[in-house]
Image (tube, helix red, strand yellow):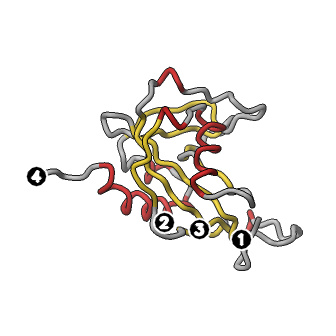
Amino acid sequence: MIDSDGYRPNVGIILSNPEGKVFWARRYGQDAWQFPQGGIRHHETPDEAMYRELLEETGLLPEHVKVVGKTRNWLRYRLPKRMIRKNSSPVCIGQKQIWFVLKLVGSEKNFNLSTMDKPEFDHWAWVDYWHPMSEVVFFKRDVYKKALSELEPLLFSKVG
């Protein structure tokens, strides 16, 4: 499902543990790290897609997490020209994403990266909140910065 501007609807997930570290995962068979993310199917809401992607990519169920918040608007990134499949129709030039921030309320034992026949990730780690900015692929950096900036106050709100 590609919108009229050429963007594929997608969700991104920032999952934190009780210490405020975030889940950072390595793409299967690659030296590329990212947050869980995935496309929204035509019959799904962003919330439904987020829970489906969470299960598919981490093995976590809704009862293992608490939704803290999500971005107010779509955040977009364009694919590099070399990655655009010009012979597909419609042509997808990038993704528009709603980002969610979640807190793990279950156990690390609930993680299972092999829930799908073709797992998305083969390794994961807890990292500092802003660490992904130094490792994510260059064309996603602006979206990561916007998502992390908008959602940080929800995760680390100062009381008093």
Q: Could you tell me which residue is drawn at 63 percent across and 58 percent down?
A: 45
Relative height, residue 14 to residue 110 (above, below)? below
Which residue does the numbered mark 4 point to in the structure image?
160
**Which amino acid does the dot numbered 1 rest on?**
Ile
First in sequence, mark 2 or 1: give its number. 1
Cα–Cα gap, marks 2 and 4: 32 Å
List x then y, in percent, for residue 29: 69, 35
Which residue does the numbered mark 3 point to in the structure image?
77
List x then y, in percent, for residue 149: 36, 61
Cα–Cα gap, marks 3 and 1: 9 Å
First in sequence, mark 4 or 1: give its number. 1
Horizontal side of 82 relative to 53 (left or right) equals right
The part of the image, by quadrant, that contains residue 54 is top right
> Which of label 3 and label 4 is nearer to you?
4
Q: Could you tell me which residue is drawn at 44 percent across and 28 percent down?
A: 106
Which label sits on residue 142? 2
Which residue does the numbered mark 1 point to in the structure image?
93
**Which amino acid does the dot numbered 4 rest on?**
Gly
Horizontal side of 155 relative to 11 (left or right) equals left
Disc 3 secondary structure class: strand
Cα–Cα gap, marks 3 and 4: 37 Å
First in sequence, mark 3 or 1: give its number. 3
First in sequence, mark 3 or 4: give its number. 3
List x then y, in percent, for residue 154: 32, 54
Q: Could you tell me which residue is drawn at 46 percent across and 47 percent down?
A: 14
Between 124 and 104, the one lying in front of the other is 104
Q: Could you tell me which residue is drawn at 29 percent across and 57 percent down?
A: 153
Disc 2 secondary structure class: helix
Mark 3 touches mark 2? (CB < 8 Å): yes
